[in-house]
Image (cartoon, helix red, strand yellow):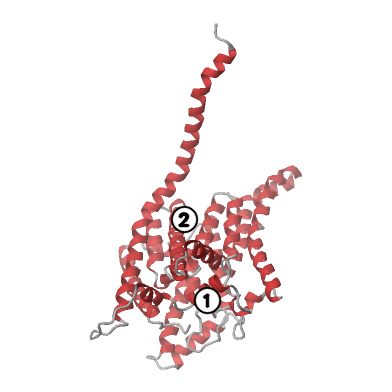
Amino acid sequence: MQTHHESSSSLAPTDAPSGLAEIQQEWRQILTPWWKATLAILPTFLITRLLFLLLTYFGGVLFTITGSSSFALTFKSVLYGWYHWDTTRYLTIATQGYLSQDYTGFFPLYPTIVHTLSALTHQDVLLVGMLISNLAFLGALVVFFRLMEREFDRATATRGVLYLSIFPTALLFFAAYDVSLLLFCLLFCFYALRQNAWWLAGLFGGLAALTHPTGIFLFIVFLYEFSRQHVPSLQQAWRERRIQAFTPFLSPLLAALCIPLGLLIYMYTLSRKFQDALAFLHPGEGTHASTPWTAPLTTIQHIFKDPFYSFTTTHSLFELSLFVFVCAMLVLCFVGPAKLDKNQWAFPLFGLLVLIYSLFYPYLPATLISQFDPFPSIQYTTLIIFSAFIILARLGKAAWFHQTVLLLSLPMLAFLVLQLLKGYWALS
């Protein structure tokens, strides 16, 4: 006769594999959509990286060496064609820390990662910085695809990824800049918010706030999205005087505090080093806030007052075009055939906050105000206003519109890459 102990023992070998199989199935269900998203964006990511590499090679060599010269460059000398603009500041922080208050406008997460990985691998800091930027951009594209696929459809997600990757200023995703890391963190925060994963959203929101000043706006977005989803339930509980019904909502609100915590950590560090917790708002003598209409009006004035074929007019036309593009896309988030549903208004809300910030702070940190570059911040902030690319992707359903975007974006992207390699276009 079989005992109870024997019976239990005989069941154990079959129960354990069953439980393991369930866990494996759960993980498979979680990871499979992400793997499919990675495969979907991989061609766009790899082809655009190849484009940047080809432009770096041909532009770096042929624009440096004349046809009658036998001189040969090295890999490092060609690579350092990307050592321009704010890359120099990020890598200075990564290698030497915050030498002075002039650098405080550049937030610490990205240079800290660059410093850590460079120290571990003993590789060139610029190469490491560019590698981190591109890996972060790969992650950002995967999250962007997943977000748009869930909110809209696969075709829209594919177009959105493509348009973001070939946008004229998308060269910053390839350079040693923090914008790729910022985009990854903020997109993951949005994705988590839409899935009610509040603590995950708070974590990535906090990382975004440690990467760039605009990351703090995710705190407002977090509260907006939480209110949109749960305020009706809270109002009902209040009317019925069910105090215990408020308890489950405390955890998400605590998670939201992770976002300002990221900024507070940086502020505490600044207060210890420079005795000024808000040093990032005024990092240099020439850096300060301006009225929100100053940069656009100055840009327009240059276009009409300066010679049409001057550097200032050309630069101003480009920056004004970016500003008009972003404004138009944000308007189309609320009106028109491509408008978003009301439950998706958190996307343009973040975009509006970022745009307003760029209007108040149109200049680069610790740089003197220049008549030749009245609105430089718009080149950066356009890339993180991802709702603009959502609308662009929805409009891209029309074949003529899709082809127009490709024909306008790709040549301008290539042109700006070549300008960067020669140290032109920007004044830094």
Number of callouts: 2
The residue that label 1 is drawn on is 89
Please provide percent x and percent y for residue 190.
54, 57
- Left or right of 66? Residue 30 is right
* Relative vertical location of residue 166 with respect to residue 360 in this rendering, above or below: above
Q: Amino acid at mark 2?
A: Val
Give the Cα distance between marks 1 and 2: 28 Å
Q: Nearer the viewer, mark 1 or mark 2?
A: 1
Residue density around tag 1, few if under 14, some if 14–19, many if 20 or more, within 10 Å: many
Classify mark 2: helix, strand or loop: helix
* Relative vertical location of residue 28 with respect to residue 362 in this rendering, above or below: above
Give the image quarter of residue 308: bottom left
Q: Is residue 397 visible?
A: no
Please provide percent x and percent y for residue 290.
60, 82
Q: Looking at the image, which is closer to me, 232 or 147? A: 147
Residue at horizontal 48 percent and vertical 28 percent from the top: 17
The residue that label 2 is drawn on is 143
Q: Amino acid at mark 1?
A: Arg
Please provide percent x and percent y for residue 356.
57, 73
Q: Looking at the image, which is closer to me, 398 or 375? A: 375
